[in-house]
């Protein structure tokens, strides 16, 4: 493999972060981990239904003495597994800091014994879907370990000469001094890449943090609105208010999938983007260029989403993959990415793959445009799942915009309204099932008639 030393090292670091993430998850939430492995006497589904009635106590407690002992035994095992993964992760970090790149590889490769065992049990306990995801993850870790071991002898430890910029502020000032034509954001951008000295890491950290902040930050206002009586009149399915416990369960699964499925992909994003000719340099493209590219991405993603989502509703694929996303018949913001890892990969191609293909064909795409696109798409997905229809919702201004008015009905009725951003596919192909606002107006009128 002709990857650079720093790229291999970054990949090794991503394995360390993966171990630390999984280990911490097991240590902080042993019960949920055991439930995810189908090992806990109280399965996940019954604990969520239970939490609807007892909001204040989301932790599942088994009833009989025997199953309580069983529960504490599996929770202890999960703590041990968590400790195991966390210690491997810490050791990998320590090797990286000591420039012991080959040792990192040896540790990752020897960890394959554990990973193989994990994959076997996950496959057995959670079925082929999770099994495949973890097998692919383990295989990529093995590949990284093998690559690091092969670097022996070619690695020279990095030495920084004195007088060079060290802190982020140093880099910023350095760039600001010689590049007066750049605006503040362009200087901050360039300083970030200069400071990181590693483009893969710089892009990886930036995109992961951005995703988490936007996802949870955008969902938060809706969680707060649920608690404010004034906003109840805008709730589409007002009789089905999600409880905090329910939203927390959902958030935990979304976080788990972010750390296990999406994080490794985000690490691969920079090399892929560069390979297909995406630009990461300054100055940024003009807003006109960004605007027309964003419009194209919205239209193409919507088409991809329509057809693939419609396919996910065929009986076999629905049962095996898409059913999980439909667990909430009255969705809320955090449920936007509550889905099987396979579904996430299929539908994410529309969001991530479309710009990559665009970059490959046109050789004209800046990674900043990609970020803006992903932020807008996250806003779209969370709004569509928010369960709120306001007089100021976007579809009142753009009648072809979908929004919650469109997607909420899909969750309520389990069919129709398959597209993501726009209404035209469902309209033209006759899969539209009416908008929530229409229904709401009808309901309100019916209630008024009753009251008279
Ligand atoms: Zn669906
Ligand atoms: Zn949905």
Image: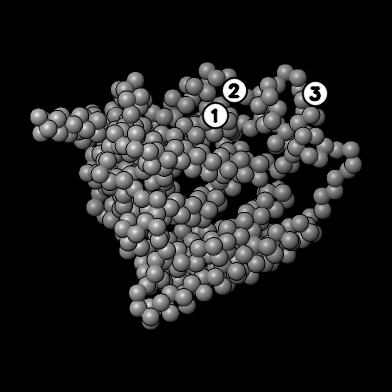
- What is the spatial separation of the Cα atoms under label 3 and label 2, in whole angstroms? 20 Å
Residue drawn at 52 percent across, 18 percent down = 288
Name the residue beneath numbered marker 3.
178
Q: Which circle's residue, 1 or 2, is located before the other in the chain?
A: 2
Of residues 142 and 377, the one nearer the viewer is 377
- What is the spatial separation of the Cα atoms under label 1 and label 3, in whole angstroms? 25 Å
From the top left corner, tell me how far across and down residue 169 is, in percent.
Answer: 77, 34
Of residues 82 and 73, the one nearer the viewer is 73
Q: Give the structural element (helix, strand or loop) at label 3.
A: helix
Residue drawn at 65 percent across, 66 percent down = 88
Name the residue beneath numbered marker 2.
285
Answer whether residue 46 is visible to the viewer in this image: yes
Q: Quadrant of the C terminus?
A: top left
- Disc 2 crowd rating (10 Å Cα; few below 14, some 14-19, many 20+) is some
Total number of numbered discs in the rendering: 3
Residue drawn at 76 percent across, 56 percent down = 97
Answer whether residue 270 is visible to the viewer in this image: no
Of residues 21 and 127, the one nearer the viewer is 21
Q: Is the C-beta separation of discs 1 and 3 under 8 Å?
A: no
Residue drawn at 29 percent across, 34 percent down = 233
From the top left corner, tell me how far across and down residue 71 is, in percent.
Answer: 43, 74
Q: Give the structural element (helix, strand or loop) at label 2.
A: loop
Q: Give the structural element (helix, strand or loop) at label 1.
A: helix
Q: Which circle's residue, 3 or 2, is located before the other in the chain?
A: 3
Residue 369 numbered mark, or none:
1
- Disc 1 crowd rating (10 Å Cα; few below 14, some 14-19, many 20+) is many
Q: Is the C-beta separation of discs 1 and 2 under 8 Å?
A: yes
Q: Establish whether ligand 2 lies closer than 8 Å to the Cβ of label 1.
A: no
- What is the spatial separation of the Cα atoms under label 1 and label 2, in whole angstroms? 8 Å
The residue lying furthest to the bottom in this view is 66
């Amino acid at each position: 493999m002709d990857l650079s030393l720093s790229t291999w090292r970054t990949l090794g670091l991503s394995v360390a972060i993966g171990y630390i993430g999984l280990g911490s998850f097991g240590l902080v939430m042993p019960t949920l981990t055991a439930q995810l492995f189908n090992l806990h006497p109280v399965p996940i589904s019954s604990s969520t239904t239970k939490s609807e009635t007892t909001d204040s106590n989301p932790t599942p407690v088994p009833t009989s003495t025997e199953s309580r002992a069983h529960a504490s035994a599996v929770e202890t095992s999960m703590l041990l597994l968590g400790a195991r993964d966390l210690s491997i992760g810490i050791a990998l970090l320590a090797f990286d800091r000591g420039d012991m790149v080959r040792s990192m590889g040896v540790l990752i490769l020897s960890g394959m014994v554990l990973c193989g065992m994990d994959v076997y049990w996950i496959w057995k306990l959670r079925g082929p879907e999770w099994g495949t995801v973890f097998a692919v993850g383990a295989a990529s870790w093995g590949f990284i370990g093998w690559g690091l071991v092969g670097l022996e002898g070619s690695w020279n430890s990095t030495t920084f000469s004195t007088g060079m910029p060290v802190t982020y502020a140093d880099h910023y000032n350095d760039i600001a001094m010689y590049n007066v034509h750049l605006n503040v954001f362009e200087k901050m951008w360039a300083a970030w890449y200069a400071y990181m000295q590693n483009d893969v890491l710089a892009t990886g950290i930036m995109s992961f943090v951005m995703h988490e902040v936007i996802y949870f930050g955008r969902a938060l206002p809706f969680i707060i609105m649920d608690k404010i009586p004034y906003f109840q009149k805008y709730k589409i399915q007002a009789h089905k208010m999600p409880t905090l416990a329910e939203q927390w369960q959902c958030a935990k699964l979304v976080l788990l999938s972010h750390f296990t499925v999406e994080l490794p992909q985000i690490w691969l994003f920079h090399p892929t983007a560069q390979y297909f000719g995406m630009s990461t340099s300054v100055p940024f493209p003009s807003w006109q260029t960004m605007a027309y590219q964003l419009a194209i991405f919205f239209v193409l993603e919507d088409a991809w989403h329509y057809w693939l989502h419609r396919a996910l509703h065929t009986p076999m694929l629905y049962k095996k993959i898409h059913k999980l996303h439909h667990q909430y018949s009255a969705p809320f913001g955090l449920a936007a990415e509550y889905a099987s890892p396979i579904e996430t990969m299929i539908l994410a191609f529309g969001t991530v793959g479309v710009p990559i293909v665009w970059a490959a064909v046109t050789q004209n795409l800046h990674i900043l445009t990609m970020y803006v696109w992903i932020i807008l798409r996250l806003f779209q997905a969370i709004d569509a799942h928010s369960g709120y229809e306001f007089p100021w919702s976007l579809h009142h201004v753009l009648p072809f915009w979908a929004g919650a008015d469109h997607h909420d009905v899909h969750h309520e009725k389990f069919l129709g309204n398959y597209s993501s951003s726009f209404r035209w596919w469902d309209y033209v192909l006759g899969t539209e099932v009416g908008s929530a606002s229409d229904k709401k107006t009808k309901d309100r009128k019916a209630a008024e008639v009753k009251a008279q």
